[in-house]
Image (cartoon, grey):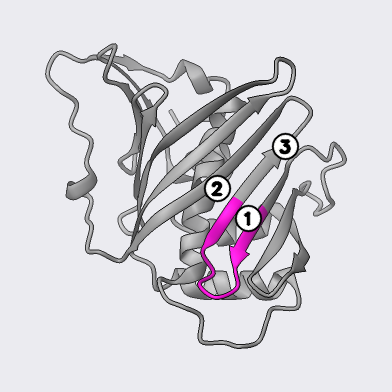
Amino acid sequence: MAARLALASIFWCAMACMAAGGAVSTSNASPATAEQVLDRAEAAEAAIRDVRLKFTQVTRLKATAEEQETVGELVVLKSPERFKVTFMSPVRQIAYYDGSRLVLYYPETRQAFRQKAALADLSRLIGVNPASPAGTFRRGYRASLAGCDGTGCRIVFSRTTAAGAVDAAGEAAWKVRVSATTWLMEDASFENSEIRISLKCRDYLINRGLNAESIRLALPKGVEIVEGIPQISGQEWAR
């Protein structure tokens, strides 16, 4: 669960970046509903080719009050669909998707875990399609506008059931704040009975001509490669 939430929260950065479209909004009209915000987000996704950004994530376990800060960098290519998440601390690790396999690499132990995964499998695992985040959340969550204050707007996303109703458990809710001028995400948080995750993103670079080769993960010679990823086992995967 924790691994899934960590990846999903980081991809909120990509969603916000796509909503921004890499430019300051030219509209002076404030969105009146969450649907209007998402309309802008999905329209902007078509113009995004690649995104690179840095993030800081704080995870708090409620049972022990223990907190862990994670910093790193995210790169997403829309076509071909690729992504790489580099976690700098507290433990250096890299999550990389090459279009057919997800790889988790731990440089300190010289181990890599890899798992075959179609994009649909990956979307189920992390809860979002990295190439079209706004559309993914629009289909899987119910959005409500929690208010705007002139500088930004806050949206609450609640997980919905297959029938379209809000999840009765009420635990899969995200709170996201976006700037009212750039439409970049300023912060996001997730909370349930066990854990709270807060996320801040910065240093966005959009459409800088990245390609699949420029972000490819080349494992050093001698790294132990293990088939399957135990940290996220139990999910539905393509074999």
Q: Amino acid at mark 3?
A: Glu
Q: Residues within 10 Å of mark 2 (few under 14, many from 20)?
A: many
Ranked by sequence position, the earlier of labels 3 and 1 is: 1
Q: Amino acid at mark 1?
A: Phe
Is residue 230 visible in this depiction of the protein? yes
As drawn, the label of residue 191 is 3
Q: Is residue 98 left or right of residue 15?
A: left
Q: Is residue 185 left or right of residue 195?
A: left
Which secondary structure lies at badge 2?
loop
Q: Is residue 44 left or right of residue 219?
A: right
Question: Which one is closest to the eye, mark 3 or mark 1?
Answer: 3
Between the residue at mark 3 and the residue at mark 1, the CA separation in whole angstroms equals: 17 Å
Q: Residue at x 50, y 72 (%)?
A: 182
Q: Residue at x 51, y 80 (%)?
A: 25
Q: Amino acid at mark 2?
A: Val
Q: Could you say where residue 122 lies in the image, as x and y percent from the top left? A: 48, 39
Between 29 and 109, which is closer to the camera in this rendering?
29
Between 168 and 100, which is closer to the camera in this rendering?
168
